Image (cartoon, rainbow, N blue to C red):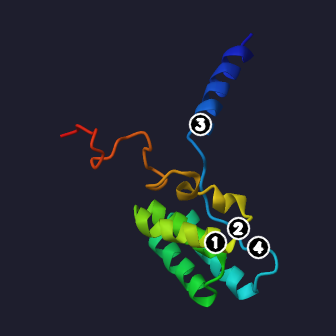
Amino acid sequence: MLMWPVLVVLSLFLGCATSGGPLVTVLAAPQGIKPDLAAQLERGNSLFAARDWPGAEQAFRQTIASDGAFAEAHYNLAVTLDRMGRQAEAKKHYIEAANLAPGNKVIWDSPPLRGRSGGLTHDVERKSYQDPSYRGF
């Protein structure tokens, strides 16, 4: 009899914890990549996980400088820039990552490529002030 209220509270807690939209995170190095590049990418991933966006940005840029054709590095840099509010720059790296990895579903499901521009926190339903029908002033 006492278990029923505990189960209800637990299910409410789990339901609230799992709702919140798609989780966008960084990618690991693919199989067969040079060990030094994989280590650079992992360093950036660790900084990203620690929410050190500037540090992660620097690490991902260093990885790209070592190999400009590394799609996961471009994607991870894009996600980091997006988190920093630099959506225009992030979009360029999302697109570069998609061009380098045409079959990667995670990359192709990134915000700019799934028809939503403006970054991870962009409200696609909100009208732009540039829309002639917008009367927000």
Residue bearing the label numbered 3? 19
Residue bearing the label numbered 2? 102
Asked if the residue under mark 3 is in contact with the one under mark 1, i.e. CB atoms within 8 Å, the reply is: no
* Local SS, label 4: loop
What amino acid type is highlighted by mark number 3?
Answer: Ser
Asked if the residue under mark 2 is in contact with the one under mark 1, i.e. CB atoms within 8 Å, the reply is: yes
Residue at (27%, 43%) from the top-left corner? Answer: 132
Asked if the residue under mark 4 is in contact with the one under mark 1, i.e. CB atoms within 8 Å, the reply is: no
Q: Is residue 30 above or below residue 25?
A: below
* Local SS, label 1: helix
- The answer, for residue 44, to whether it is visible in the render is yes
Gap between marks 3 and 2, in whole Å? 29 Å
User: Badge 3: how crowded within 10 Å, few (<14), some, or many (20+)?
Assistant: few
Q: Which mark is residue 30?
A: 4
Residue extending furthest toward the top: 1
Residue bearing the label numbered 1? 99
Mark 3 vs mark 2: in front = 2
Residue 122: give x, y in percent of width and height: 43, 49
Residue at (70%, 70%) from the top-left corner? Answer: 101
What amino acid type is highlighted by mark number 1?
Answer: Asn
- The answer, for residue 46, to whether it is visible in the render is no
Circle nearer the N terminus (4, 2): 4
What amino acid type is highlighted by mark number 2?
Answer: Pro
Residue 102: give x, y in percent of width and height: 70, 67
Q: Which mark is residue 127?
A: none
Circle nearer the N terminus (1, 4): 4
Q: Viewed as shown, does residue 112 lie left or right of 69?
A: left
What amino acid type is highlighted by mark number 4?
Answer: Pro
Residue 48: give x, y in percent of width and height: 55, 67
Mark 1 vs mark 4: in front = 1
